[in-house]
Amino acid sequence: MDVAEVTTFLAKTTPFDQLATAELANLGANINVYYCQQGETIQLSSERLMIVRTGIFALYSDQQTLLTKLEEGDFYGYQLLLTGLSDNDNLVCEEDGLVYWLNADAFHQLRYQYKNIDIFFQRLFGRRLHQYKEQQQNSRFTLKVSDIVQARKIAIDGGQSVQQAATLMTEKRVSSLLVEQNEQLIGIITDRDLRSRVLAAGLAANTEVSQVMTAKPHVIDKHAYLFEAVQLMSRHNIHHLPVLDNQQSYSMITATDIIRSQQDHPVYLIGEIHRQTSVDGLEHCSSQISSLALTLGKQQVPAHEAGHIITTITDALTQRLIALAQLELGPAPCVFSWLAFGSQGRMDQSLNADQDNALLLEKEPAGEIAEYFAALADFVCQGLARCGITLCPGNIMASNSALRLSLKGWSGQFGKWVNSPTPDALLKASIFFDLRIIEGSRGLFNALQQDILARTQDNALFLYHLAQTALQRSAPLSFLRNFILEHDGKQKKGLDLKKRGISLITDIVRVYALAAGISEINTRQRLVQLAASGVMDSKDTQNLSDAFDVLAQLRWDKHQHDLAQGHDVSNLLDPNVLSGLQRHQLKDSLTVINDAQSSLKQRFCRDL
Amino acid sequence: MLAWLSDKNSPLSTIVQTFNQKTLPPGSVRAADCPFLIIDLELTGLNPKQDHIVSLGWLPVRKHEIILNEARHYLVQSPVSVGQSAVIHGLHDKDFQQAHDLTEVLTELLQRYAGYIFVAHHSQLDCRFLQVASQRIFGKMAKFSFIDTLNIELYRLHKQGIVMKKDALRLPQCLTRHKLPQSGQHHALADAYSCALLLLSQLKHSHADITLADLQLQSR
């Protein structure tokens, strides 16, 4: 005698959705229902499976880090059921809810009878292990020794001669050796030792290594943090540290290794870019961008900072290319500003961004002036393309003559977009409203920006159309329903984090910023200004900013993953790779977007 | 499992006697620790003297958990046609071919759930029908200790100073207010389940050590 509400729920919950009606009723009869209140800790008093019916539950590790959130249709307790081992984790109810407890016998019988259900829970368990391990690794802020040294044990026996040591060092092109006896590390010898303790002391070439080596050297475990190695070296003023794995010699880490590992730092790369004297050189520099991105990822640099850094590098490349162009073409015949639009303009560029740029000229582009800037633009755009910033498929580039205009020309162009807007035209043009100067005259640029803001501020008709454009796409909330495990064979497409997420926020925020005459163009900065000036509710701007960060972080993580795997960088996210917590955050963020779109519609699309 | 039915030796009247003699939890005990039986009846009308029980649904709550394994739903053989009440509960005469004898059903109820605090939404009606039925069948009136989730809800809302709209105390409205899932209405077991969820939520939202006596006061 089943309770219809329970069986109906089970019937739409993976993996029970494959069961026949009679089986579902039987499953229901093995369930106890419990009401859990916010703040309550779930007691896993006996072996049984928890099925979340309603409410939200937060799972914490024994160190009290949030691992994941459970909600409708999620499970808990399967680890104990599958392995007999309990976790030290802690499940706390965050929002009142109902919990179904399925008893262990019924759970095991079900697994026994239905292979698919068994596989489902085994995978859930497997995924959980994987997820949490990864999360724990990521919670560290620095690199480990093993991240920068390879297993490269170059050792010599203590009984061999210093000459043999010198030969081995030369052969292996290293400056130091591990000294071993019976496979145990007993010391190290460096080329400096050979100089000061052997040659300078007048010892013979057949002196035993053990006589001149540094005995009982400081060592470091391969799992130690890099900063521990640095500390050890500077405290004892040494440059070589044997690296041990499980008390056995593994490798050697040197001061040079550490410095080299830090050279991925953007400051080094930008410095190097400005020293280049040819496009070839710049191309070579930019080949380091992806390894820099990986390092930034490992160092847990948040997505918005990474976006900023990547933009700064593109800016540096652009500036250097303009300088190189002028070396080749001679000085510019008039004052100009090199403009960037879109993500470079907003300083949230990602690894797969294409070029969006243009030229603003002091004088009308005619005759010599036209020719000069055509050549300059071509040089820079082609140069950027060689550096990995692909040509814009929509031809929004300075190399397009329609985008090399005087102040009057640009002002007229913006006037056309603002005064006779159509959603279709604006869809293409909205990117132009996020513009920033990269090189050239700031005065010229400021004049244009003031002109644009004066046109857009409180211009109801324009804002109406711009808002309409921002509302053309929506965040695919439905996409998230029950996506944790699709049945095999279903097509896996993925969520376009840019088109169906980040861009939607950018578009919404742009409307408010232009309406309020705010000159900031970075989305996060715009939100700060909008809240400060009271144009938007500070809670709404905070929500949007958080949602933006979550989506940008997911994209950044995705790009990192693509890079590490050697794939092309893509914005398509397979929701199945998300942890429960990420899924929860993603869902929240998409909800925030939908809410913000409704507010936008209310505010700008009402009276017309 | 069906031991209480095979106990044919006990004369009918002793069933009620045994039920009435079973000690109930004392008022001082924590309400949450009491065993509850949540019950709902579908009826042919509102008058216990004239109208009949069409179906019964029940499920127990022990140690804060609804035990679905003991959920029961019985259609009862009716001495008269279901008639007009079919409009409400959707049960028609043809559904009653597998119906149970009310004597059997009440025997199970009384033998199994002696010592339980009974719970219903608007319990007065259910209580009266059960009393009349036990009197008629067993020649002796069973003494039920009922608490009423409707009255508890009324008490709660009063205490919070909430102005009540019409229908605010009906079961579906209570479920919505407590953010609990809705069941199909006018099915005895579905309604008993909804009432059980409501009870669990009401208990959790009372002060943690609320005694049975306090709860009984609220439910008056």
Image (tube, coloured by chain):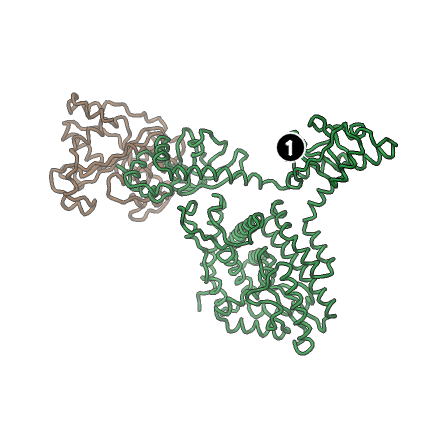
Is A82 placed left or right of B35 in the picture? right
**Above or below for A329 versus A549:** below
Most distant residue in the bottom direction: A367
Percent across and percent down for residue A204 are 85, 31
Q: Is residue A43 at least partly visible in the picture?
A: no
- In this rendered view, identify the residue nearer to me: B184 or A227: A227
Quadrant where the C terminus of chain A sits is bottom left
Q: Is residue A362 at least partly visible in the picture?
A: yes
Percent across and percent down for residue A8 are 31, 43
Percent across and percent down for residue A207 are 82, 29
Residue B126: quarter of image: top left
**Above or below for A177 versus A572:** above
- In this rendered view, identify the residue nearer to me: B153 or A387: A387
Is B25 placed left or right of A39 in the picture? left
Residue B5: quarter of image: top left
Secondary structure state at the residue bearing disc 1:
strand
Q: Identify the residue at image location x=47%, y=43%.
A: A580
Identify the residue under disc 1: A245
Give the number of callouts.
1
Percent across and percent down for residue A259 are 72, 44
Q: Colour of chain B?
A: brown
Q: Identify the residue at image location x=21%, y=44%.
A: B89
Q: Identify the residue at image location x=46%, y=59%.
A: A597
Quadrant where the N terminus of chain A sits is top left
Is B91 placed left or right of A306 in the picture? left
Name the amino acid type tagged 1. Answer: Asp
Is A431 placed left or right of B166 in the picture? right
Residue B69: quarter of image: top left
Q: Colour of chain A?
A: green
- In this rendered view, identify the residue nearer to me: B34 or B63: B63
Chain letter belonging to callout 1: A
Crowding at dot 1, Cα within 10 Å, few <14 / some 14-19 / many 20+, comes out as some
